[in-house]
Image (tube, grey):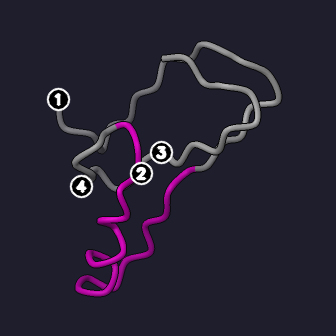
């Protein structure tokens, strides 16, 4: 996937997002119900770059 310079990206860490690999903030409701503390992982590249992303919490 290509990430663009100076654009903020929020990646899912909980696995509940409907927009994997991106965060759609579904963790907020889950955190309230389950007393957890999931948060998105944010990145703002200082140049355009290509990356491969994966997480063990994401369903295939």
Residue on which the image places disc 2: 13
- Could you tell me how far apart the alpha carbons at marks 2 and 1 are, in whole angstroms? 14 Å
Is tag 1's residue or tag 4's residue first in the polypeptide sequence? 4
Q: Secondary structure at mark 4?
A: loop
Could you say whether the residue bearing mark 3 is in a helix, strand or loop? strand
Q: Are marks 1 and 4 in contact (CB under 8 Å)?
A: no
Say whether residue 45 is left or right of residue 53: right
Residues marked 2 and 3 touching at CB (< 8 Å):
yes
Q: Position of residue 50 (x, y in %)?
A: 60, 13
- The relative height of residue 28 versus residue 60 in the rendered view (above or below) is below
- Helix or strand or loop: what does disc 2 sit on? loop
Q: Residues within 10 Å of mark 2 (few under 14, many from 20)?
A: many
- Residue 37 lies in the magenta-colored region: yes
Residue 20 lies in the magenta stretch? no
Q: Of the numbered discs in the image, which one, if any, rests on residue 60?
A: 1
Name the residue beneath numbered marker 3: 11
The answer to which image quadrant residue 25 occupies is bottom left
Assess whether mark 1 and mark 2 are in contact (beta carbons under 8 angstroms).
no
Give, as a single range, the part of the protein colored magenta. 21-41
Q: Give the residue at the far right of this rendering.
A: 46
Residue position for label 4: 16
* Among numbered discs 3 and 1, the one appearing first in the sequence: 3
Q: Nearer the viewer, mark 2 or mark 3?
A: 3
Say which quarter of the image contains residue 38. Answer: bottom left
Which mark, by number, is residue 50?
none
């Amino acid at each position: 996937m290509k990430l663009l310079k100076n654009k903020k990206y929020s990646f899912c860490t909980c696995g509940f997002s409907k927009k994997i690999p991106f965060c759609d903030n579904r963790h907020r409701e889950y955190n309230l119900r389950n007393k957890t503390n999931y948060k998105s992982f944010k990145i703002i590249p200082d140049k355009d770059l290509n990356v491969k992303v994966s997480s063990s919490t994401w369903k295939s």
